[in-house]
Image (tube, rainbow, N blue to C red):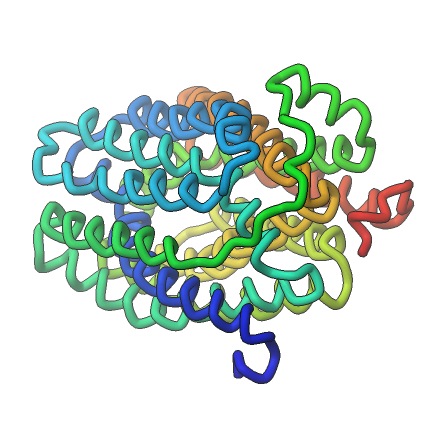
Amino acid sequence: MIGLRFSPEIRQALRIDISATLLFTVFAGLTGPFIGLILRRDLGATPLQLAVMSSAGGACLLLSLLWARAFHGRPPLPYVVWPGFAARGVFLLVPFVSSAWSFVGIVVARDFFGAAAAPAQAAVVERVYPRAQRGRALGVIRMAGALLGIGLALAAGQLFERVGYRGIFVAAALLGMAASLRQRHLAVPELESAGQEPGGLAGAWLAVRNDHAFRRLLVASFLFGFGCWIQTPAHPLLLVDVLHVSASQVGVFAAVAAMATLAGSAYWGWLVDRRSSLEALRVMYLVGAATPLIYYVAWSPWVLVASSVTDSLLSVGLELVWMMAIIDVAGPHRTAQYVAIGATLAGVRGIAGPLAGGLLIHAFGVHAVYLVASILTFFGAWLVGRELRVRVSAPALLR
């Protein structure tokens, strides 16, 4: 299938990326879905600790402009490989966890190194995969991970019921580190010119002020993203305290999410190549806006199967569609800077959102968070739809 649709160079890159993705899928499947459950159920994390963990993860994104400047004029691949290696390697410390705070510290360290890799990752994608085939190529990579993730998710839920989480996290960390090392074999073309060096906060302000299409895109994404971030401290409370979800059920949700990711990877890749990244972004935001509504009305753990579908479609869309929209509006010389600007604003809402969510939980209860989140996310989707309808001087976004 790959051989019929892509050039030999792209096929070679896909082989490397797919193998790295399969390793990363095992790492992510054995860690991410269970962090909140372990913190709340096994380590007794408080709402404050959950909010601090989420906000600290957002704070790490505030350094994105610094990371973008660090690799300007240098090959971006090492800035993808080694921060990713460290982000996964920190889970080797899980056997030494003795409290919720120490586990939170490990998660924050993961987020710190992961944020360092994001601007360089976008630059690598922009250079390796041509625009005409980029969406489908990234879709193939995501689909490979989703296929593995379907069976892995079901097995992981049962594994956590029978084996201690400490050993599982160590094994997952080793596989995640191997995924980073595999990426070292990617052949990343050099740019003829590195372009103007990103100018930190001043340069970011100028970019946002002068690029009207980018500014409107940031406003919509900020509202939508804030609606997503305020939910983060509520999820473990809803799962553990309200719906009493078991690890096996979390595994089922993750399996359903993997199947939705498989479909979403193919659909988003097709949409951004055949229509536009902005149209795909509007659809993605509408799908994502349904998630807090499902959480709001959930009366049984099994209702969350629906939210697993919408949330996974959003997650794969954020990886693929948002990156494509940024690359389209930025061009090759500004991709890392624009990704860093978007990540910095994500950091701002990542700090404020969970704390605001914690305050909402304290004042009005868990369900109030999901009501506010649905309003914010639908408004963000409306703004993108308005931009798509008026089509005001944003040709790069509408390619």
**Which residue corresponds to the image point at 50% horizontal and 23% vertical from the top-left?**
66
Whether residue 159 is visible, yes or no, is yes
Q: 371 or 328: which is nearer to us?
A: 328
In the rendered structure, the answer to whether residue 244 lies left or right of residue 392 reads left
- Residue 346 appears at what percent x and percent y? 55, 31
- The reply to whether residue 226 is in sight is no
The answer to whether 101 is drawn above or below residue 175 in the figure is above
The number of numbered badges drawn on the structure is 0
Q: Is residue 36 above or below residue 275?
A: above
185 in relation to 46, above or below? below
Residue 201 pos. (x, y %): 62, 17
**Quadrant (top left, top right, bottom left, bottom right) of the C terminus:** bottom right
Of 341 and 296, nearer the camera is: 341
**Would you identify the image quadrant in which residue 372 lies?**
top right
Corner quadrant of residue 221:
top right
Query: Which residue is at 34% across, 60% downward?
Result: 25
Q: Judge by depth and name the residue closer to the eye, 35 or 82.
A: 82
Q: Residue 116 vs residue 200: left or right?
A: left
Q: Nearer the viewer, residue 148 or 379?
A: 148
List the single residue furthest toward the top.
202
Where does the image place residue 174, in percent across and percent down from the top left? 19, 52
Residue located 76% across and 31% down the image: 215
Name the spot of residue 34 as percent of width and height, x first.
26, 48
Q: Name the residue located 54 percent from the left edge and 23 percent from the top edge.
A: 348
Give the vertical position of 313 relative to 343 (above or below).
below
Q: Is residue 173 left or right of residue 350?
A: left
